[in-house]
Amino acid sequence: MTYCVGILVREGLVMLADTRTNAGLDNIATFRKLHLYQTEGERVIALATAGNLAVSQSVLNVLTEGLENPETGKIDTIYTIPSMFKVAQFVGRAIREVYRIHGKSMEQQAASFDVTMLLAGQVKGGRLRLFMVYSAGNFIEATTDTPYLQIGEHKYGKPILDRAVTADTPISEALKLGLVSMDSTLRSNLGVGMPIDVLVVRRDELKISISHRIDDNDAYFAGLRERWSAALRAAHQAIPEPPYGPI
């Protein structure tokens, strides 16, 4: 399983992704799911993946190896596409290309062609954007009304984001809320696991502000987990008793 989240606020972008992959209870491994593509001052792009690992890796290879542009005959890569909207289209095309090559044979072997991706970033001259790209190659975009997107095991980490995240949330608070969302998922689903990769990009800087991996020895994350648990206990204890009769 997987949990990845992207949060787009006015100050910038926060993305988090776990690293656990498993094909059964006794086959657990760690693979990076948050991938970064940067040409400082020109573009900064992040891609988080969920679903079949072989499909995800094939798509990532296509994005860097490139596809022929049907209009120019040149090879396009994720480093040459001129806007984030066109990058989202390019990622969708890469997914469809991998399906063309492998999809039918996977289905014959009863293997699911399952891949979902969070794509975010900024290309010089354009704005910072966040998309979710589906296995069919189509996509949706985060908006000021819905400033975050999730893939994978999203239900445990969603309530805190629904309650607390807005487009005006300071980016430092968005990072904290993303970490709380990740902690909630880690506690409730064994298919999501450490380490956690974290990315922060400030709007219009066209470079990575923070790229960090949180492991089991990370003191800040351990403290955040304990403080959040203590705050929840204190909050429910402070609520008055239900007035519906003696208990």
Image (spheres, rainbow, N blue to C red):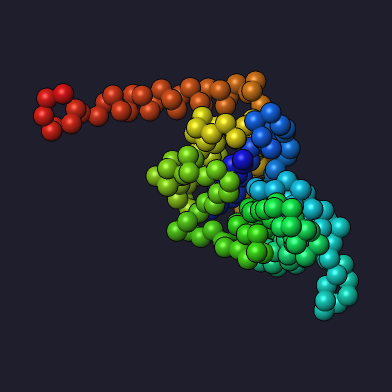
| Image-based side of 73 in relation to 96, left or right | right
Please state the horizontal and vertical placement of residue 36, each as a whole percent of the image.
Answer: 74, 47
Hey, which residue is sitting farthest bottom in the picture? 71
Q: Quadrant of the C terminus?
A: top left
Residue at the image position 82 percent from the left and 76 percent from the top: 70
Please state the horizontal and vertical placement of residue 109, each as a whole percent of the image.
Answer: 74, 53
Q: Quadrant of the N terminus?
A: top right
Residue at the image position 58 percent from the left and 49 percent from the top: 151
Nearest the eye: 247 or 63: 247
Please state the horizontal and vertical placement of residue 105, each as a whole percent of the image.
Answer: 78, 58
| Image-based side of 51 in relation to 187, left or right | right
Location of residue 102 (image quadrant):
bottom right
Please state the horizontal and vertical placement of residue 204, each as a whole percent of the image.
Answer: 65, 55
Relative to 201, say whether 74 is above or below. Answer: below
Residue at the image position 54 percent from the left and 52 percent from the top: 149
Numbered-mark total: 0
Relative to 217, say whether 193 is above or below. Answer: below
Nearest the eye: 19 or 198: 19
Nearest the eye: 124 or 92: 92
Task: Let me know if residue 225 appears in the view.
Answer: yes
Hey, which residue is sitting farthest left in the picture? 245
Residue at the image position 45 percent from the left and 58 percent from the top: 145
Task: Let me know if residue 94 appears in the view.
Answer: no
